[in-house]
Image (tube, helix red, strand yellow):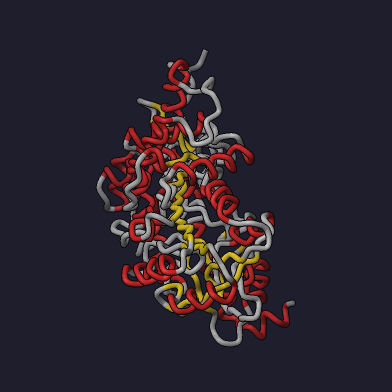
Amino acid sequence: MPEPTEPHVSTWTPDLPADASPLYAAIADALARDLRAGRLEVGARLPTHRELARRLGVNVVTVTRGYAEAARRGLVEGTVGRGTFVRDNGHCASPFMPLLPDEATPRDLGFNLPVCEPELLRIPELLAGLAEHPERVPLVAPYTATGIESHREVAAAWLERSGVEVDVSRTMVCGGAQHALAVSLASLTSPDDVLLADELTYPGLNALASVLHLRVVGVPSDESGMLPSSLEDAIHLHKARVVFLMPNLHNPTGVTMPQRRRQELADVARRNDLRVIEDDTYGFLLSAPPAPIASLLPEATYFLTSLSKSLTAGLRVGYLALPQDGQGSESVLRRVSANVAAITWAAAPLMGELASRLIQSGAAQAQVEWKRAEMRARRALFETRLPQLRTRSAACSAHVWVPLPLGWDAEVFASTARERSVHLNAASSFTTSRNRTQRGVRLCLGSPATREFLSDALERLGQVLAAGPRASAQVG
C-alpha cells in the first residue's frame, strides 16, 4: 500500500499593510482575507514559523503569535511534527470562538459590545472544573434575591476597583446591568414619575421607562456632562426624585465627567434629596477613573456595573451597590430584594459562580487589560480612516459620538450607511428631549470581530461622507 503523500507546502506570503500594528494580528487578518479570496486552499500546509519570519523580515515570535491568533479564529490548526494547516473557516475551532463575518456580512457599528479575547477567559477549563467538583456548584442553593454570600463578597471586591467602598450587606448580584437598572428604578419610582437623564442617554433607559410608565426628561449638558444648574431647575420644575447618570465613558457620547462636575452634581442631589442611579458599565476601560458619585454621595446613590461588557456578552452578571440611607441599609435592601424576587427571584447562581471564578483566577483582570489596549488601537483606526470627523469621546472608549458635517441629517446618514452594509445608530435612538435636533451618530468600535472588518466599515463610511448628503438624497 503506498505511503500517504504529505500536503504541498504553500508558498503563501501575506501582504501586510505598511502601518500594520500589531504585526501578529495583521498576519491573521491577511490569512483570513486570502482564504476568502481563494489565494489559500483549505488543507494547505503553511510555511514554517521560521520560513515565514524570514520572508516577512520579522522575528519568529511574531509569526508564532500570528498563527496562534489565526487558530483562535478557527482559520488554521496545528499538528505537532507536521505543521500548520488551513482549515475550513466556516467552522469554529471551539464553540466559544465567534464565527468571522465575510464580505456579505453587514458591518455592525450599532451594537455596543466590546470585542473579547476568549482565550484569556479560559471558559472551557473553568466549566470543566465545575463539572469535576459539582458539590461546589450552588445549583441546589435556595433562592436568594441578593445573591449567594460568597458571590456578593467577590462582587464587593470587584466594585472597590471602581472606587466604591461597599460592604457585602449592601451588595447585590443581578442578571446583568439592565436587570440592576430595572430593580433600581422599580424601587425608586412610581408610574407617571419623572426620571431625569442627559438629553442624549442610554437607549435601554428609555425602554425601561416605557415599561415602568415613567416620563424621561432630558437635562442639558456641556462638554463636562450634565449641567448642575439645569439639574436643579429640572428637579424643581418636575418635582423629580431620581436622576440617571453615566459619568464614565457616557453612552452615547463617550465623555468622562471630570471630578469637579461630579462633586457639583452630588451637592445638588444632596440639597434636593435626589436619588442617583450611577451606571458604570464602561468604566472598566479607564485605568484611573475619577472618584464615582457613589463615593461622594453614598447615602443616595445606586451604583451598578456589568460583566457583559468588561468580560464577555454571554456572562449575564451585574453587580449593584446599594446606598446607606438615613435609617441604615436594611430598608433599602428589603425594597430592592422584593423587586428582584418579583422580576426573576434571583440571578442565576451558576452564572454568579462562573463570574466569581473568573475574577478570583485573574482571568477577568487579564481580559480588562486586553480590552483597554484593543479599544485604544481601534480608536487609532477610527482617526486614521476618518480624519475628517471629530469627537470628544475618550481615547479608550468602545464607542464614539460623531457630530456630522453640516448638511447631513443623522437619519439619512444612517440609512445611506446601511446601503453600504454598515449599521450604526443615529441620534434619535438616544434622545430624551424630542424638541432638540441632534445631528450626530454613534459608532461602536468594539463590535466588529476583527480590526480588519472595523477598518473596512470605517472606509465605507468615508465613501458615504465623500459622496456628500446630496448624492445620498438622490440615492434614496
The image position of residue 290, as x and y in percent, is 31, 62
* Residue 269 higher or lower than 438, as above or below: above
The image position of residue 96, as x and y in percent, is 51, 36
The image position of residue 465, as x and y in percent, is 56, 78
Q: Is residue 244 left or right of residue 421?
A: left
Q: Is residue 89 visible?
A: yes
* Residue 440 higher or lower than 278, as above or below: below
Camera-side residue of 433 and 124: 433
Residue that sits furthest to the left in the current view: 59
Q: Is residue 200 left or right of residue 133?
A: right
Instruction: Report how many numbered discs are placed on residues in the image.
Output: 0
Which quarter of the rendering shows the C terminus? Answer: bottom right
Q: Give the residue at x 39% y 66%.
A: 266
The image position of residue 61, as x and y in percent, is 27, 43
Camera-side residue of 137 and 364: 137
* Residue 413 occupies quadrant: bottom right
Camera-side residue of 167 and 389: 167
